[in-house]
Every structure is written in C-alpha cells, then in structure tokens.
Amino acid sequence: MTALLLPLWPALAVAFGLGIACGLMTGFPRSRTTLIAAAVPILALTVLTGLAWTESVPGRAGLYLEIAALLLAGYVAGCLLGALVARLSGRGS
C-alpha cells in the first residue's frame, strides 16, 4: 500500500480537498432523493474495494481499480468531514 500511496498522495490530497469543499457546500442529504444520490458513491466505493481486496482484476486494470478505490475513499471521507463541519458550524441544517 505504501508503494501505491507514495506517488499518489497529491491526487489523494486533491480528492480529499474536493470532498471537503463539496461537503461544506451541500451538507448532509436532507431529502429521500438526495439520500439515494449520496448512496451511489458509497455503493461504488464498496464494489471497488471488494474487487480490489479479492484481487479479481489482474494486471494494469487491477492497479487502476485500486487507484480508483483509493481516490474515491479520500473523496467520500472529505465529503463526510465537510458536511460534519457545516453541520457543527450551523450552516448545514
């Protein structure tokens, strides 16, 4: 994992920062439709992580899958942190 993180840390930082910005602007989902839309990246992250963990995709495609899972995890974590900060600051009710 360290070999994957070392060259990708700038992209991971950008994904996390973008997630924080999106989470600050939107906050937590409030309606049923936005809750379903917010579940899509979480479902995609679950599928990508499962495929990466079982190593079912070999070669270069497997590497790209692991990179996608890593960057999507950073984005989702940033979104959650940004939405939490927005809620605690009183902007996202």
Image (tube, helix red, strand yellow):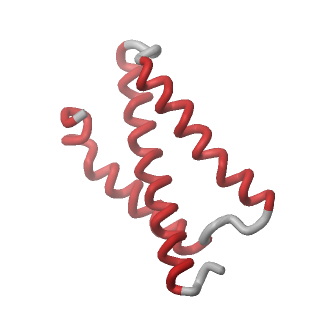
Please identify the quadrant where the N terminus is shown. Answer: top left
x and y, in percent, of residue 16 in the image: 39, 58
Residue in the picture at 53% in, 39% down: 45
x and y, in percent, of residue 47 in the image: 56, 31
Residue in the picture at 74% in, 51% down: 36
Most extreme residue toward the front, as rendered? Answer: 88
Up the image or down, 36 lies above or below 80; here it is above
**Residue 1 shown left or right of residue 32 in the figure:** left
Most extreme residue toward the right, as rendered? Answer: 32
x and y, in percent, of residue 9 in the image: 26, 48
**Residue 87 shown left or right of residue 66 in the figure:** right
**Residue 49 shown left or right of residue 35 in the figure:** left
Quadrant assignment, res 44? top right
Up the image or down, 6 lies above or below 20; here it is above
Choose between 56 and 61: the one closer to the eye: 56
Please identify the quadrant where the C terminus is shown. Answer: bottom right
**Residue 65 shown left or right of residue 32 in the figure:** left
Up the image or down, 58 lies above or below 34; here it is above
How many labels sit on residues? 0
